[in-house]
Image: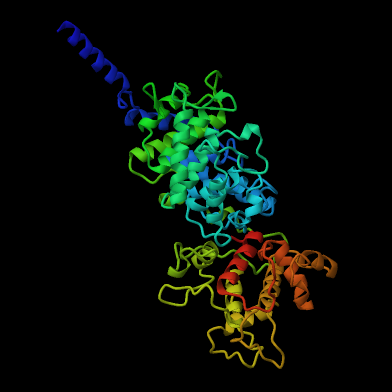
Amino acid sequence: MKKRFLALLLVIALALTLAPCAFATVSSSTINSAVTGTAKYVYTTTPSPQVGSIGGEWAVLGLARSGYSVPEKYYQDYYARVEQYVKDCKGVLHDKKYTEYSRVIVALSSLGLDARSVGGYDLTKPLGDYDKTIWQGLNGPIWALIALDSQNYPEPTSGIRQKYIDRILACQLDDGGWSLFGGTQYETEAYSVSDPDITGMALQALAKYQSQSAVATAISEALDCMSKKQQSDGGFSSMGDSNAESIVQMIVALCELGISVNDSRFVKNGVSLLDALMAFRQSDGGFQHTSSGSGNNQMTAEQGLYALVAVQRAQNGKNSLYRMGDATKITIPTASGGAGLPGKHADVKQVPVTAAGTTFTDVKNHANKAAIEALAARQIINGVGNGKFEPDRSMTRAEFATITVKALGLTPKANNSFTDVKSTDWFASFVGTANTYGIVNGIGGGKFNPGGTITRQEAATMVARAAKLCGMNTDYSTAAARDVLSQFGDYTKTADWARSSLAFCYDNGILDNSALNINPTAYIKRCEIAQMLYNMLSKANLL
């Protein structure tokens, strides 16, 4: 009897030792306290976030998604720096590292801002270039997916999301995980073994696509791989070092997948991933990079913050870190610009926002949504009734004259120059003003043809004339125009009289210079005109 009793005690003790729930979980109050403390640390140590992987976007992301009380001016100033940086770079953040675009897009999305309209540039557009995005390794397509999905941006190139998903799946290693160059032509022995950082990021990118059977299988294999790689102390090693960042990426991955950080597959010796991460946290709220290191590391603190925020959001039933449909939009002061350029015509002035929040049901996911809404908020452009904008409809000459005069803040006044424009026509004063300032001309014979449609090269010519009134240098010599336009397959089909203006518009980002063709005689759409005027006003410092 005594032997049986001792045996029973041994079985009970062994069962308690092996029970998957026999570990101490970090309480909600502890997580809340940690988020507050680390947010305070990041806010204090990053007083002026810039464009960059340290002291920049990751700090903004963590703070914005944490709900920590930060003055709105902090984010406004950050956006102003981003906008100026983008303008200085002429929209090219990097020739090869396209994660530069993705990182900024994610940060702007966390502030409820549209990354498709930053200083007149669409930062999502480069992510439509598959070959350039995958150049730097697997983090290219991973972060392109995360960025595009952060605010459900329209695809810059049709089908690009699936191409990035397929690329990630194709690069999965035999052990079930991923590495930076594993599965690519640049794979070496060092990259033939999965890395927890890249694997965690790949899982984050794929989380939204678990309904695809191939994705679901890949995720299952990767989780099994990472569970086996997890160390006895609950953490991970990357490049030979046990570090906090590897834990961060796996924590965020689990949260994006909807898996608890206390999942038994990721608890070793009673230590969860969150327990392991907290071991790197310092008393002042910062984090050290490696378990053997000393002091704080700024990047680790910023990443540690957004990992804690991911857990907190999961526990509170909120959207995950990268699903930002619930982001609170910050207000961008119109006073940040609007003074205009030196040399602008004295009659040209900034148009204030008088109808904030104006939008249309048919531009909800449109590529030119930000430009359309920005002009509508200033009543420069209007809808067509019933809450619609009809973005793909062509635009008449009278309509174009009207919105251009409004965009420049000019005072409408008829000049009775055209026999086919009656003084009682709703557009008479706008056509007259546009003609007086040299923005539009007649078609000959004293006629204006107000109902005629505008072609792309005609629109470029008229916008260039408006830009000249704003103080911009629109004069391009024949040789200079040819240098700009020769990249387009159909540039020889453009009219001689339009080439200087087209070159100006493409060279200054008023027209999209990544397009393959100009299509000079095609009718321009209302959405395209809105984007051109928005880009021009941004360049002219009138927004």
Residue 300 seen in this snapshot: yes
Judging depth in this view, the residue of 477 and 31 nearest the camera is: 31
- Whether residue 43 is visible here, answered yes or no, is no
Seen as rendered, the residue at the extreme left is: 1
Snapshot quadrant of residue 271:
top left
Residue placed most toward the observer, 111 or 212: 212
Judge whether 368 appears above or below 23 on screen. Answer: below
Q: Image height check: is 336 above or below 221?
A: below
Quadrant containing the C terminus in the rendered view: bottom right
User: As rendered, which of 323 and 530 lies closer to the eye?
Assistant: 323
- What percent of the width, then of the height, locates residue 291? 52, 20
The spot of residue 114 in percent (x, y) is 52, 55
What colour scheme has been applied to the protein in the rendered image? rainbow
Horizontal and vertical percent for residue 261? 38, 33
> Does residue 127 appear to the left or right of 519 in the view shown?
left
Q: Is residue 377 above or below residue 251?
A: below
Image quarter where the N terminus lies is top left
- Residue 108, how many percent across, how many down? 53, 49
